[in-house]
Amino acid sequence: MTNVLKTPASHAVKPQSPLVRFYRSPIGKKLISGATGLALAGFVLVHMAGNLLLFLGHDAYNAYAEHLARWGVLLYAVEGLLVGIALLHIGVGMSVFVGRLRARPEGYAEYQSVGENSYQSLSSRTMIITGSILAVFLGLHLWTFKFGPYYSTELDGHAARDLARLVVEVFHKLPYVLGYSAVLLGLGFHLRHGVWSAVQSLGALHAGIRPLAYGVSALLAGAIALGFVALPWAIYGGLIV
Ligand code: HEM
């Protein structure tokens, strides 16, 4: 009599859709992480430039915010997309991190380059830490500004939200200025490795231009972090009132 091995019903292998298979594959994770990361970096760059408008005065800043608010349903759609992209980015990042922990619980004692130049750096080794800090920060940030106190002002003869007043009020407090500076340093580190690694993952990096791309990524990360951090300090220092 032959023994037939039966799989218990609870362990039956369920067929996976191609999308789930893609999400779970290492190459799928790299591509999703790269594409969502670049989209988020694009948002952060535009957001930083928008914030700099406060250097031109309260009206310029409030007019920009009001202009965005006028997008109405389209703005909700963009915000929904942004949330989806951020969740996907975080989900993939966490799953890669947990997968690596399982494969190598103790980590390497030292990071050494073998053969060609290693692009391991403090930034690349702290992606999970800086990413987690940014995720927590985002919740607090939206609470402070987007869902914060609603001040009104007059703009071209009609009532509008006075976001400039709120931003100035918040950054008159030193703990906020210091807290934002620390988080923005983390953002700079995250972007420094993230942008370069994303472009590489998407297959756009020929080995020859890798050092250049690495430099451009560092420059962009520095410019974004500095562009953001200039505002809290300019307000705290009395340059913007
Ligand atoms: C000095 C630094 C920053 C300032 C002054 C600032 C200011 C603001 C303000 C005033 C809003 C509310 C806009 C509105 O309700 O119309 C906002 C929204 C937002 N901020 Fe920031 N921000 C800063 C840094 C950051 C950073 C570093 C990130 C991401 C890592 C970020 C992500 C967001 C997001 C996702 C929103 C919601 C956008 C939306 O719903 O349309 N911000 N920020």
Image (cartoon, rainbow, N blue to C red):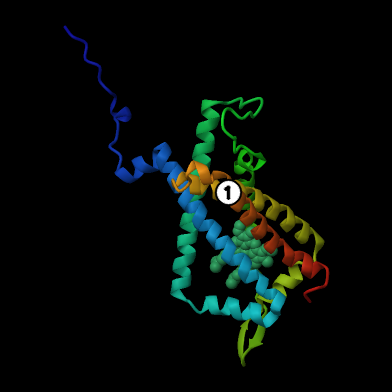
Left or right: 55 as drawn, with respect to 134: right
Q: Nearer the viewer, residue 68 or 148?
A: 68
Q: Position of residue 219 (x, y in %)?
A: 64, 54
| Vertical comparison of 1 with 143: above or below | above
Q: Nearer the viewer, residue 110 or 2?
A: 110
Which residue is outermost to the right? 237
Q: Nearer the viewer, residue 231 or 218?
A: 218
Type of residue at label 1? Leu
Which residue is outermost to the front? 208
- Read off the residue under disc 1: 212
Helix, strand or loop at mark 1: helix
| Vertical comparison of 150 with 22: above or below | below
Q: Quadrant of residue 154?
A: bottom right
Residue drawn at (44%, 48%) of the image: 32
Which residue is outermost to the bottom? 157
Q: Quadrant of ligand 1?
A: bottom right
| Vertical comparison of 13 with 68: above or below | above
Residue drawn at (36%, 42%) of the image: 22
